Image (cartoon, rainbow, N blue to C red):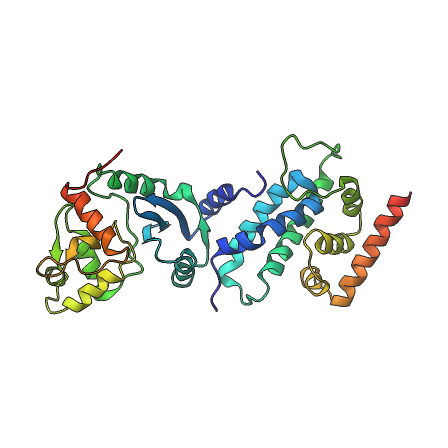
Amino acid sequence: MNMDTHELARRAAEEGLLDVAYTTVDAPFGRMLVAATPRGLVRTAFEAEREDDVLTELADRISPRVLEAPARLDGVRRELHSYFEGRLTEFSTPIDWQLSHGFLLRAREACAAIPYGQVRTYKELATAAGSPEAVRAAGNAMAKNPIPIVVPCHRVLRTGGALGGYGGGLECKRWLLDLESGTLRIYS
Amino acid sequence: MRLPPFQTLIDHHGRDVHRYLVACVGPIDADDCWQETMLAGLRAYPGLRDDRNLRGWLLRIAARKVLDAHRATRRRPIPVEAVPDRAVDAPAPSDPALWRAVRRLPEKQRAAVTLRFAADLDYAAIGDVIECSEAAARQNVRAGLAGVRKEWDR
């Protein structure tokens, strides 16, 4: 090996110099970027967000010590693959909430508590987050969710059942809901 | 100041740094030096005040690691010129004997010649790395080339 970046990431982590580790994971609807700090999963992103932009955001908001380090994300990758295959209903990977604050944090934590296969309305989410009136803010918390899939903002719908929005595209949101309701045919 | 993700530095300049190291310490030690350079870079990175020449900054760290490697080598028994036992896909110095001659030059000349021809830096950037003026960098390259030529002609 000439420039062994995996070895570099391993040693950096050992010496406490790896503040943000990232890799890409294959999802049924395209590649996802996943990033973690030593505390836990901090960011997931769909292909629609440019990788450079996401990494720059992480460098600005967390630390510029950002390295591609697939081995640091083995656990998350395994869980995501199992989830996409319908074999995992609850993520156990620890979450680092540092990109969320105030009401946005409360709304996302409330979202993380929605069980697999169930859905809530934005209004119910706002209530669960402690501010029943803040329906629009709850929608905003979901729209800018930094950890989609693992923080399951796809389980939040408009009152009346309309899909609302989704960062990964509405087709993706429908796919995830079908997966969780067991109506999706999984080909293997 | 907004520093880019460190991975971007590796993607953009990692290869140049490695090429420079191969030219300075040979293909075997270059890999270790590269690791040490990048770790030292990571350590210092968040405190960096000037983001205008990140490539020069990395090469400056690499130059220090080369010094360390040379000091360590001097303490070791004289190594045989071993043939690497593995493939080296680094843009290998086209003529190893030539680079060995470069490696025998005085410190500054060696660094200047290597930075000029292995890392393709201009004289201002070389001066930046070895901490001298552009004119002095040019002079070091010239003197270094003369030294190599002299050895070559023997």
Residue drawn at point x = 70 percent, y = 62 percent: B122
Farthest residue in the left direction? Answer: A160
Residue drawn at point x = 40 percent, y = 47 percent: A23
- Of residues A15 and B99, which is closer to you in this image? B99
Across and down, in percent, residue B145 comes to 82, 53
- Which image quadrant: the C terminus of chain A? top left
Across and down, in percent, residue B1 comes to 48, 69
Residue drawn at point x = 15 percent, y = 51 percent: A114
- Which image quadrant: the N terminus of chain A? top right
- Of residues A29 and A154, which is closer to you in this image? A29
- Of residues A95 and A139, which is closer to you in this image? A139
Across and down, in percent, residue A113 comes to 16, 51
Whether residue A13 is visible here, answered yes or no, is: yes
Across and down, in percent, residue B58 comes to 60, 56
Residue A112 vertical placement versus A92 (above, below): below
Q: Is residue B69 left or right of residue B45?
A: right
Farthest residue in the right direction? Answer: B154
